[in-house]
Image (tube, rainbow, N blue to C red):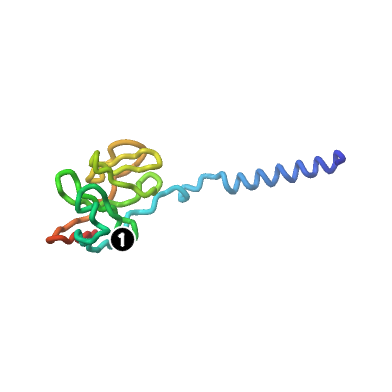
Amino acid sequence: MDRQNFLQLFVLGSAAAATGCLGGCGSDSKANDPAPPATGIDFTLDLTAPANAQLAAGTGFVYGASNSVLVAKTDTGAYVALQASCTHEGVTLSFDSNTNRVVCPRHGGTYSNTGAVLAGPPPAALKQYSVVQTGTSLRITG
């Protein structure tokens, strides 16, 4: 390869890299923004259904409304329904029945069972939904 070809390839490669970085390295604040909490929530869970056995026992949790709501049983026996995505980056959360807290697996964010931020990077509390128990049914709205 002669010097002229080398310089042409170098300039073209540098321009392509700069264009890619300028287009892809910029701050796109929408890319990492979590989805807003679900609205118009209204669904019912049957606590006797096999899929909800761990929820009823207080050793697990379930997702409802297309995985946008996390439903758990607290150590006091109350049921709570919270936004299922972390307010930091939108990662799906889980409920730790041993600590009675909601946790984010990505950056270690921790929320109380009422949705308040306890630790980590989450900038805001989780949306809490209304839970009404009638017999073995839970109705979640919000």
In-image side of 123 versus 9 (left or right): left
Furthest residue to the top? 119
**In the figure, 30 relative to 10: above or below?**
below
Q: In this view, does 70 lie to the left or right of 91?
A: left
Looking at the image, which is closer to me, 33 or 119?
119
Residue 63 image point, x, y percent: 30, 55
Report x, y in % for residue 5.
83, 43
Q: Residue furthest right?
A: 2
Please name whichever residue, 133 or 142, is drawn nearer the observer in this view of the structure: 133
* Pick the front one: 25 or 128: 128
Task: Read off the residue under disc 1.
Answer: 65
**Residue situated furthest left in the rendering:** 135
At 35% from the left edge and 47% from the top edge, which residue is drawn?
Answer: 86
Q: Percent position (x, y) of residue 24?
A: 57, 47
The image quadrant that residue 46 belongs to is: bottom left
Q: Is residue 56 above or below residue 5?
A: below
Residue located 21% across and 51% down the image: 80
The residue under label 1 is which amino acid type? Ala
